[in-house]
């Protein structure tokens, strides 16, 4: 999860542009939103 989030942040791409070797974008975004909301 962390690698996928860092990939999006580093490359400035949209969530749907995650490469196939990372988890599905919806799952990654769900964790990102959850962790952002709780201050993690």
Image: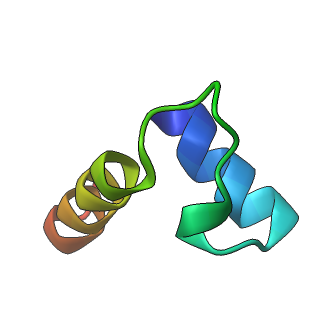
Colouring method of the image: rainbow
**9, above or below 1, in the image:** below
Residue 26, image x and y in percent? 32, 57
Left or right: 37 with respect to 5? left
Residue 7, image x and y in percent? 72, 48
Left or right: 3 with respect to 39? right
Residue 29, image x and y in percent? 36, 60
**34, above or below 13, in the image:** above
- At a point 79% along the width and 73% down the height, the residue shown is 12
- At a point 61% along the width and 33% down the height, the residue shown is 3
Left or right: 30 with respect to 12? left
Residue 24 picture quarter: top left
Q: Which of these two is toward me, 37 or 14?
A: 14
Q: Which of these two is toward me, 29 or 24?
A: 24
Left or right: 1 with respect to 30? right
Q: In the displayed orientation, state which residue is furthest to the top.
A: 21
Q: In the displayed orientation, state which residue is furthest to the front.
A: 20
- At a point 51% along the width and 36% down the height, the residue shown is 2
Residue 19, image x and y in percent? 70, 41
Q: Which of these two is toward me, 22 or 10?
A: 22
Q: Quadrant of the N terminus?
A: top left
Q: In the displayed orientation, state which residue is furthest to the right.
A: 11
Q: Total number of numbered labels?
A: 0
**21, above or below 14, in the image:** above
- At a point 70% along the width and 64% down the height, the residue shown is 9
């Amino acid at each position: 999860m962390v690698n996928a989030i860092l990939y999006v942040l580093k490359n400035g791409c949209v969530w749907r542009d995650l490469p196939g070797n990372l988890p599905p974008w919806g799952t990654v975004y769900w964790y990102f939103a959850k962790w952002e909301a709780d201050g993690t």
